[in-house]
Image (tube, grey):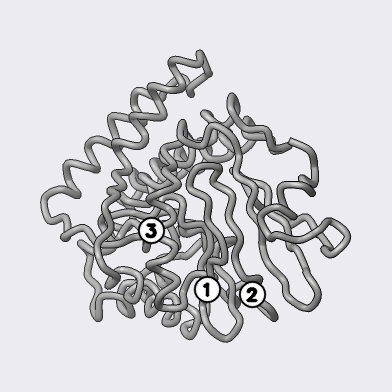
Amino acid sequence: MSSVPINTIKNLLGVSAEDVHIETLNGGLTNKNFKVTVNKDSYVVRISGKNVSILGIDRKNEEKAIKTAESIGIAPEVIHFDPISGHMVTRFIKKSDDLSPPHSEKTIRRISTALRQIHSLPQIGSVFSPVSTVKRYVSEIYARKLDLPDNFGKLMETMLEYDADLAVDRPMPCFCHNDLNMKNFLDDGHIRILDWEYAGMNDPNFDLASIALSFQYQSEDIEALLYFYHGKTDARFEKRIKMLIYMVLMFGLTWDIVQQSISELEINFTQRSAERYNAIVQEMEKRLYEE
C-alpha cells in the first residue's frame, strides 16, 4: 500500500487529485487514515487494511453499528461506506480535542452518560464475545506458528475462571463499542467516539473495563465510573470490572500477536504484545495481593 493512495481517495470523494489537500493522520492500528480537504469541506478517509477478517472484523456489521451510533450524534457523520473494500469517508470533526482531564469527576460523568446512550441503542445482529475472540486469535496464532508467552496456558486458565465467575450474574447483552481506548474519544463540546469495528452485543461492563484500563483509572476513578453509570457501586461491581480488565488485556495481547503476521503498518506489534503481557502479569499479581 503506497503511503498516500491518492487515486483511491479521489475516487471515494469523486474529485480530481488537484482539488484535494491530503494529510496523513497518525494512530491507526488496522487501517490508514487521512484528513482530506476539498474546498472548505474536510473529511476523514479510511483506507482499510488487508486481511481484517482474520481479526474478526466484519465490515457489514461495522457499517450498521457506526450508522446506528451516528443516529444519536456519538459517531462521526458517515459520508460513504464500502463494506466490500472497507474504505470509509466520514465528516472531519472540527475543533476537537482529546477527552481531558480524564480523571476529573466531570469527565467521568460525561463518559458514563455517553456509555449509557450507546448501551441504549437498538440491538444489532453482531455479537462480541471476548473469550470466543481470544480463542479464535489463539487458533490463528498456532496456525501461523507465532510465539505465545511461555505461561500462556495459565493465562488462558485464569481467563476461563473469570468468565465462569462473570457468568453467574452477567447482565443482558446490549449494543457495545468493545474497543474503547483513549484515542477513540474526541471532544468538540460533545463526546464523539471513533472506530466501531468491533461493535456488537456484549456485557456493557466490558466497555467500562476498557475505559478504566485505557484511562489508567485507579480504584477511586473506577468507583466514580461505576457510580455515575449504574447509580450505585459495590464490591461485586468493582470485582466484575477488574476481571473484565483482564479480558480486555487478553483480547489486546492475542490481537497484537496476530498483527505481527498480517499487518502492513509500520508498527512494532512484537513490542506492543510484550507490553500487554507485562500488564497482564501485573494485573494477576495485583489480584493475588488483594486476595
- Label 3, secondary structure: give it: helix
The correct choice, above or below, for 204 with respect to 160 in the image is below
Q: Are marks 2 and 1 in contact (CB under 8 Å)?
A: yes
Quadrant in the rendering for residue 21: bottom right
Tell which circle, 1 or 3, labels the residue nearer the N-terminal end. Answer: 3
Q: 205 and 234: which one is in front? A: 205
Left/right placement of residue 187 relative to residue 123 reads right
**Which residue in the structure is indicated by mark 3?**
64
Q: 22 and 215: which one is in front? A: 22
Give x and y (percent) for residue 228. Answer: 33, 80
Front position among marks 2 and 1:
2
What number is the disc on residue 55?
A: none
The correct choice, above or below, for 169 with respect to 253 in the image is below
Point 53% across, 83% down: residue = 190
Give x and y (percent) for residue 145. Answer: 50, 13
What number is the disc on residue 192?
A: 1
The correct choice, above or below, for 146 with respect to 231 in the image is above
Tell which circle, 2 or 3, labels the residue nearer the N-terminal end. Answer: 3
Left/right placement of residue 24 relative to residue 190 reads right
Left/right placement of residue 239 relative to residue 149 reads left
Left/right placement of residue 267 relative to residue 2 reads left
- Cα separation between marks 1 and 3: 17 Å
Amino acid identity at mark 2: Ile
Front position among marks 2 and 3:
3
The correct choice, above or below, for 229 with respect to 210 in the image is below
**Which residue in the structure is indicated by mark 2?**
93
Q: 83 and 16: which one is in front? A: 16
Give x and y (percent) for residue 33. Answer: 68, 53
- Label 2, secondary structure: give it: loop
Point 45% across, 65% down: residue = 218
- Cα separation between marks 2 and 1: 9 Å
- Cα separation between marks 2 and 3: 20 Å
